[in-house]
Image (cartoon, rainbow, N blue to C red):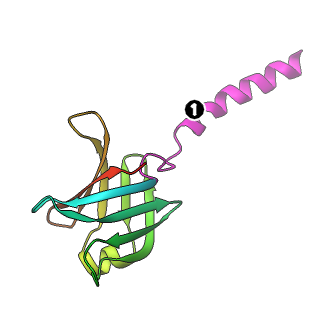
Amino acid sequence: MRLFKIFAVMALCATPAAAQSLSGVGVEGNWGCRALIDGTRAGLLTIYAGSYGYASANFGSSASGTGTAEMASNGVTFLTGNLVEGAGIVTAILGFDEAGQDVLQLYTTEKNVLTCHVRN
C-alpha cells in the first residue's frame, strides 16, 4: 500500500508538467488565407510538427514553398523558408473571429498582412 501511495503522488506531480507543454496543436492544420489589403484569396497554409507549406493563389509567388517553424501555444514563429524570405512573414498569432471561430493572423515585422481560417 505504501508503494502505491508513492506512485500516486509521483503521477500527480507529473500531471501539471504535462499540461504545460507547448505543442502548438492549436495552429497545426490546414488554413485558407486572405489578404487584408483587399480581402482576396491569398493561399493555403499547412502547419504540422515544426514545418509548414504555403501555396499562394498568385502564380509564381515567391511566398509559395516550405519552411520550418517554432510552435507555441498561441501561435507560431516562421524560422526559415519562403514565407520568411519571399514575403517577410515572421509570426502568426492564433485568435478568434466575431463568430468564435479560430483565426490565424500572419504578420511581417511591420503589420498584419494575412488572415487565415481553418479549412475542413
Label 1 crowding class (10 Å Cα cut-off): few <14, some 14-19, many 20+?
A: few
Picture quarter with the N terminus: top right
Give x and y (percent) for residue 111: 14, 62
Where residue 58 sits, quadrant-wise, is: bottom left
Give SS at disc 1: helix
Residue numbers of the magenta segment: 1-28
Q: Main secondary structure of the magenta part?
A: helix
Percent coordinates x, y for residue 85 in the rendering: 30, 80
Q: Is residue 12 magenta?
A: yes
Q: Furthest residue to the left? A: 38
Circle 1 is placed at which residue position? 16
Relative to 8, residue 20 above or below: below
Please give left or right for residue 93 compared with residue 18 in the image. Answer: left
Looking at the image, which residue is at 30% across and 61% down? Answer: 91
Residue 112, placed above or below residue 86:
above
| Residue appearing at x 35%, y 64% in the figure | 44
Q: Quadrant of residue 38?
A: bottom left
Q: Position of residue 31 (x, y in %)?
A: 37, 56
Horizontal placement of 15 versus 34: left or right? Answer: right
Q: Which amino acid is tagged 1? A: Pro
Of residue 34 and residue 94, the one placed in the foreground of this image is 34
Residue at x-position 43% and y-position 75% = 66
In the image, residue 52 above or below residue 29: below
